[in-house]
Amino acid sequence: MTRLIVVAIAVFVTMNARASAQNAADSFQAGAQLAVARSGQFESTELGIGGRVSWHPMALLGIESEIDLYPADFPGDSVPFSAARLEGLFGVTAGPRLGSVRPFVKIRAGFLRYSPAPEPFACLAIFPPPLNCLMAAGGTRPIFDIGGGLEVFTGERTFVRLDAGDRMVRYPGPSFADGFTLREEGFLGHDFRLSVGGGLRF
């Protein structure tokens, strides 16, 4: 009888351990967020709204995809060369769940799609042209995002998330950037990017 009780307890503990692991891993998340990016290249801030989905195949790892729309003209404090931007990011997060919080690091890649200038954009007839003249025609630029953040699990199925990082934009060349800096080929610009949002786990 004692042996039977021990076996029953062992089976019960194992099943609960597996259920807990299943809750921590192999889960999906979907949420909405606000994103703020401060362009180091153009010294202007843009505000966006978007959504994110992720899959956690194991407790420490998340695979995610995110789409954000920045609807305002950019830059906002000078003659704009883009009417709106669409951002897509795809990558991974890594970090442990510690009770109701999960700190993580992230690395993602994707694109930043620039709409053409909202109005005719006057440019000097020089070569190479200023960078904003190259950008005024619109187009898609590769981006990379490295940083970290925190997820807080506010309920059995709800969470809030804050993350920040360095969004690196691959700009075209040759061009004159920063007013007088000659860039003979494409280069990486650095933006500080912050997002906050929340959603559901299922």
Image (cartoon, helix red, strand yellow):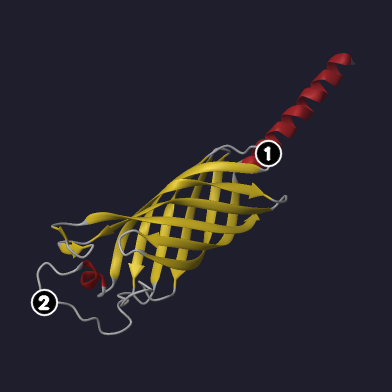
Cα separation, mark 1 vs mark 2, equals: 60 Å
Give the quarter of the image for residue 13.
top right
Q: Is residue 1 above or below residue 99?
A: above
Residue in the picture at 64% in, 56% down: 200
Question: Which sits in the foreground, 91 or 73?
Answer: 73
In front here: 9 or 56? Answer: 56
- Circle 1 sits on which residue? 99
Q: Is residue 98 above or below residue 71?
A: above
Report helix, strand or loop for mark 1: loop
**Image spot of residue 120 (x, y percent):** 25, 84
Would residue 143 be found to the left or right of residue 173 on screen?
right
Q: Residue furthest right?
A: 1
Query: Which residue appears at 30% of the width and 84% of the height?
Result: 119
Secondary structure type for disc 2: loop
Q: Is residue 178 left or right of residue 145?
A: left
Q: Quadrant of the N terminus?
A: top right
